[in-house]
Amino acid sequence: MKKHNFSAGPSILSPYTIKHTAEGILDLDQSGLSVMEISHRSKEFIAIMDETQQLFKDLLDIPSGYSVLLLQGGASLQFCMVPYNLLQTKAAYLDTGSWASKAAKEAKLFGEVEVVASSKDTTYSYIPKGYVIPSDADYFHITTNNTIYGTEIKEDMDVPMHLVADMSSDIFSRPMDVSKYALIYGGAQKNLAPAGVTFVIVKDEILGKVTRPIPTMLNYQTHIDNGSMFNTPPCVAIYAAMHTLRWYMDQGGLAAMHKLNLEKAGILYDEIDGSPIFTSNIGDVNDRSIMNVTFVMKEEYKEKEADFLAFAGSRGMSGLKGHRSVGGVRASIYNAMPISSVEALVETMKAFEQNL
Amino acid sequence: MKKHNFSAGPSILSPYTIKHTAEGILDLDQSGLSVMEISHRSKEFIAIMDETQQLFKDLLDIPSGYSVLLLQGGASLQFCMVPYNLLQTKAAYLDTGSWASKAAKEAKLFGEVEVVASSKDTTYSYIPKGYVIPSDADYFHITTNNTIYGTEIKEDMDVPMHLVADMSSDIFSRPMDVSKYALIYGGAQKNLAPAGVTFVIVKDEILGKVTRPIPTMLNYQTHIDNGSMFNTPPCVAIYAAMHTLRWYMDQGGLAAMHKLNLEKAGILYDEIDGSPIFTSNIGDVNDRSIMNVTFVMKEEYKEKEADFLAFAGSRGMSGLKGHRSVGGVRASIYNAMPISSVEALVETMKAFEQNL
């Protein structure tokens, strides 16, 4: 039985991506070779790399002057690569969750770090507003979607310094204005591919300003100069990413994906807000993520949480348990999640309510 | 038509690995989920990670006191991680090729580096001998197999300081004595898995001696403390690696793989040494790699090299062109290469000789 996969990451990928990746592993385009065993210098793989980078540019409408890099190491390695390449004296960070906090911690190895605001006081249940970013910061770092807590910054910010964003869990969820960012990065394992490839979208002109020596592999310029082929790239993950991006194109691009995402999130938040037993832990509806819908049982039903998760599991729903640091329920409804799975979850919630 | 895949890397993997990886991508063990879309914290993936690490220990007979890490970034990222974690004042490097040279270059960012010997004068056609390693070196770094040039250090060295080895292209090719090494690392894309996972075998007690701050992701201790799950691991590449290692077990372990590798290399070197038109570029037979068999056309047949590669291509042989920096022919005959493919290559060489 195919599951309804609500996992936060690695997470659901489109059936199109899964089918084509499996086919390429058995035999890449009738070449007699697996995509796992061809040289990254072969014309076949170079075509895969080129198409994937071009699809990034087309789908996100990336202006000229930016490079798209496909690297390894996950967002966690970017936490140190960003300050290694960009932090001259001071950086500003917005603390919206444990990933944002880890990013700020890493930057402290390279210079002064000012955390301009934090919602840690309420276990990150809101996106801070009204903070002041120091004007002498080399860059301002945000985490646009906070997978664990279910909050999201859903608009492209205007700030007077370089804006750097970890968009691991909401890239490709909506059309965006890349020109407002100096650098965007993320792990692939939500809206793109299996874990193992990391994207970086970087404005070329921001590089080369720091004076510290940078190890070759940690220097963005290395990867720009070598088209992400300085060393062997994670070929299979990139091949899967290409198919996900082709599928987005086929679906009508990011405007269409966004419409669908808003619809899915709307169905689920409506059920939560109208439910006698479930409730949202995110007070400001503007802060609610359209990728990770977190909710809890109302105080008087708290002890039924495990029962609900077991009941949902029995109906083929996987990955709904909230992160261990916050508990509750988390439905991750990334791009590849069909409306039918969200509707199945809502039916399950209603059935559980009625059986109580 | 299935090709004879002589690619230097990414390179041939066993049909067992290819079949099972494709199956897991479609449906992991009848779970209703793809191995690409399950959480790395799921019991299913934890079992995959645990088994893969255990198979490393069993196949290589790794003594206690060592950790097996499965990371990202390739050997190229290890070029900076090794000195970041181990170089206190001075390191010694043996320069046996361009990868060895790149490793030494990176170490210079972290301290004094002494290159104890180099065979660069003859385009790395031999393994230097009789060098002196400075006794105050924190470690001595070697590249055991030089993929581009076809040379290999085939025995485990005794040195009085920490021995660090890049074994990207000959790990699992023979039984070895891990206790002679402080740290062994490599990219996966030869004898293990598709590109995208990097193994590190490290003696725990050598860590924690440097005083410089180390970014979290570049610190081996981070990954030891978190069982290679500090951040999301490259799950699909690890799943493929597990199957390759299961297959080695089924084949009789590394003693059996070594016997087969010696036989395959022997067949090919015998043909080269007896040929009227081909010749080896590695003078000392002890230095010849059993993984990458490089050879050239004798001076009077030099202009026929492209014809030979085209002829071999027409007979289903892929990836035989020598690296652009050295030219000639390179037959990479990693563990997964069957004897029948080596025999087919020898027949092709003989046929080409006769048709000249």
Image (cartoon, coloured by chain):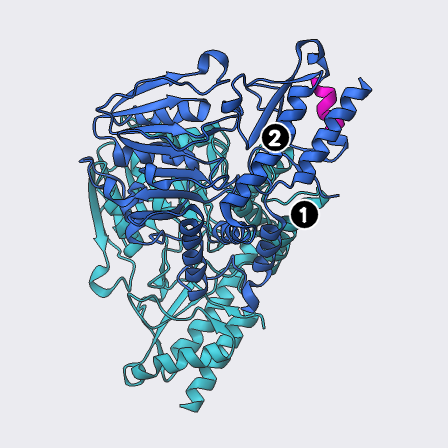
Chain colours: A cyan, B blue
Q: Which residues are magenta?
A: B305-312
* Towards the viewer: B262 or A24: B262
Front-most of residues A254 and B197 = B197
Distance from disc 2 to disc 1, alpha carbons, whole Å, reads: 30 Å
| Residue at 40% in and 50% down | B57
Task: Judge whether A64 appears above or below A211 on screen.
Answer: below
Residue A74 in the image: x percent, y percent? 40, 47
Question: Mark 1, chain letter?
Answer: A
- In the image, what residue type sits under mark 1? Asp
- Dominant SS in magenta: helix
Outermost residue to the right: B355
Q: Which secondary structure, mark 1?
A: loop
How far across and how far down the image is residue A257, in percent? 54, 57
Quarter of the picture containing the N terminus of chain B is top right
- Residue designated by label 2: B266
Q: Is B301 displayed left or right of A69 in the figure? A: right
* Residue under label 1: A27
